[in-house]
Amino acid sequence: MIKIAILVSGNGTNAENIIKYFANNKNIEVSIVMSNKKDAYGLTRARNLNIATGYFNREEFTNGTTLRQFEQLGINWIILAGFLWLVPDIILNQYDGRIVNIHPSLLPKYGGKGMYGDKVHEAVVANHDKESGITIHTIDQHYDEGKTVFQATCQVLPTDNAHDVATKVHALEYEWFPRVIEKLVMNEKIEF
Ligand code: GAR
């Protein structure tokens, strides 16, 4: 069994979508959803779907406590689904190439510290971009960098506001993120 841990900082709609996608999968399981926020709604979503949950503070995340938990659970891959902290070297080194993030823009546009969620969509609208989309990438030491493994685009109309763009981008996330995760962890070509 390939075991996945999902990290969230907030609402957790992507985490829920991923959990549902892999329910009953013979090869892949979501073993735990963890957060840096005790009250992240993503943890509630996980509990409602009978998935184990966990919380860590900054010290536990950086001093190896969280890494030990991953290892004790036999976690093979870590998925960042709306997770807002940088992942420390101690975890990066152990899971090199096996930590995957989703970002709600076409990176390298609108990435970096502080660019998340609605801020990204507001910037897209303010710049009158004609398209936006999602980037799925393995991570490195920097915010929203690393190796891009998949992008998908959506049209942005002149009449769209940030909320409209968010809706389109979320739809892409729900459609593609679980399928890309599946290909990655099964070591299959990212082709659809
Ligand atoms: C998603 O749109 C994800 O792409 C974004 O946060 C949202 C989380 O939504 N991530 C980032 O901006 C990371 N820089 P969710 O909690 O409902 O899945």
Image: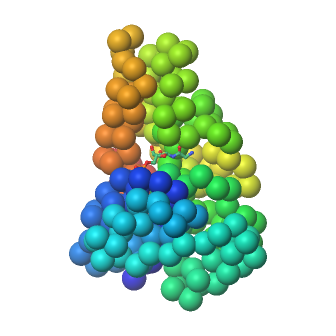
Q: How many marks?
A: 0
Q: Quadrant of residue 127?
A: top right
Camera sees residue 149: no
Front position in the image: 50 or 108: 50
Residue 105 horizontal side relative to residue 158, left or right: right
Q: Is residue 115 above or below residue 34?
A: above
Front position in the image: 183 or 75: 75
Residue 93 horizontal side relative to residue 188, left or right: right
> Which residue is at the far bottom?
72
Expressed as whole percent of the image width and height from the top left, the position of residue 130 reads 44, 16
Expressed as whole percent of the image width and height from the top left, the position of residue 141 reads 74, 55
Front position in the image: 51 or 30: 51
Q: Is residue 144 above or below residue 15?
A: above
Type of colouring: rainbow
Camera sees residue 119: yes
Expressed as whole percent of the image width and height from the top left, the position of residue 98 reads 57, 66
Quadrant of image for the N terminus: bottom left
> Which residue is at the far front?
39
Q: Quadrant of residue 30?
A: bottom left
> Which residue is at the far left?
24
Residue 161 horizontal side relative to residue 146, left or right: left
Expressed as whole percent of the image width and height from the top left, the position of residue 112 reads 67, 39
Q: Name the residue rendered at 48%, 19% in the picture.
A: 125
Front position in the image: 126 or 157: 126
Q: Is residue 48 above or below residue 42?
A: below
Q: Name the residue rendered at 51%, 25% in the picture.
A: 122
Q: Name the residue rendered at 31%, 40% in the picture.
A: 171
